[in-house]
Image (cartoon, rainbow, N blue to C red):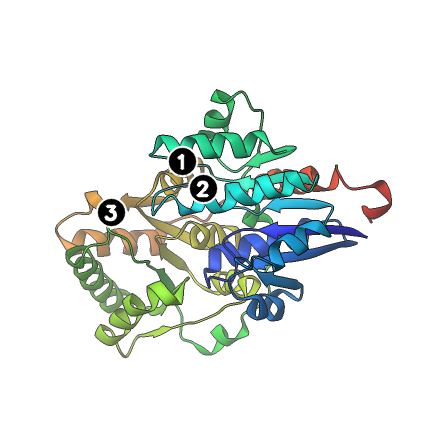
Amino acid sequence: MLRVVLSGYYGMGNGGDEALLATLLQMLPATAEPVVLSARPEATEQLHGVAATERSSALGVPKALRQADWFIWGGGSLMQDATSIRSPLYYGGLMGLAKNFDLLTIAWAQGVGPLRHRSSQWIARQAFRQCDRISVRDRASAALLQEWHLEPTLAPDPVWALAAEPFPELSSLPAPRVAVVLRTHPQLTDARLRLLVTALTQFQQATATHLLIVPFQPSQDRAIAEAIVAQIPHHSRMILEENPRRLKGLFRGVELVIAMRLHALIMAAAEGARCWALSYDPKIDALMAETAISGWALPDLPADAAVLSREWMECLANGEPLSPETLSSLGDRAAIHQHLLRSHAPETLLS
């Protein structure tokens, strides 16, 4: 049995990070025995069906590492200081502890940065240098690690390859259906949110769509979702879903997705929906450039809501989802993250 400790932004109720965990569990060797470091171990155990321990436990974390063979930084932007220096300190400290226990260490599907402070850069550089294998999900992260004389494997975000589950509840809702995924962020000011709600109202009235408002991280995004539903009460509803496989399956039943969150766009595009992005971060810009997804940067939104509503109408009527060839290529390339994992497992564990 291969004992593996998984570390990431898990148990925080973020649909994108839970999707990364679900994909990592999907890609592990079949006979691996994972333990997840989670902010809510019981919720993680119930949602993913694996063992979990409190991510900040001074006793539980060293115990899990002491009993493990591998330590994996799960996917996402773990080494960043956009909010504070605590993330580099926490994840860098775990990597150092794992090396002290002589574990094989893997940084998996990472997005590196932003690292605005010299101390954060130093911590990240030292932590990545302790990794036996590294995969990243974007070119900017690969370029940064190469500046540090490291050679990561580059592949698309692994959630492109996540197996979705059906979301049959959508069948009872009128079509066309449009999903909206907004998040709290300093760039989404009150004025810009009012502009978007006005545009959504105009869009709904012009197209008779049913709006599905999906807070990907309800603890942060639910207030925005509730505000939209309150202003478009008869033609919208909020959908709360924790299971990332069902969350991805939800997008199979919609015609258009308007989203800020990276993994909402990835899930939706992977399931064949048309997508329109609201960018607040270089990772969204990179996805838009790679896939030709339309959208606007939040700071550049037009002052006239009618401009946005007309763009959404055009996307709904004439937009094209990603081609089957593009989706097949993204899925195949995302599976490179799986090869990174399975190439280091003992042959008897590869199943």
Callout 3–callout 1 Cβ contact below 8 Å = no
Does 145 appear above or below 260?
above
Side (left or right) of 208 relative to 350: left
Distance (Cα) linking label 1 and label 2: 6 Å
Q: Nearer the viewer, mark 3 or mark 2?
A: 2
The foreground one among 330 and 59 is: 59
Q: Residues within 10 Å of mark 2 (few under 14, many from 20)?
A: many
Residue at 63%, 52% (x, y): give it. Answer: 62
Residue projecting furthest to the right: 348
Under mark 1, the amino acid is: Ser
Residue behind mark 3: 298
Residue behind mark 1: 120
In the structure shown, which secondary structural element does the residue marked by tag 1 occupy?
helix
Of the two numbered discs 3 and 1 on the same chain, state the one appearing first in sequence. 1
Residue at 42%, 49% (x, y): give it. Answer: 262
Percent across and percent down for residue 195 are: 17, 58
Of the two numbered discs 1 and 2 on the same chain, state the one appearing first in sequence. 2
Percent across and percent down for residue 31 are: 79, 54
Residue 157 appears in the figure: no
Under mark 2, the amino acid is: Pro
The foreground one among 95 and 196 is: 95
Residue projecting furthest to the front: 59
Under mark 3, the amino acid is: Leu
How many numbered marks have been drawn onto this rendered protein structure?
3
Does 103 appear above or below 226?
above
In the structure shown, which secondary structural element does the residue marked by tag 2 occupy?
helix
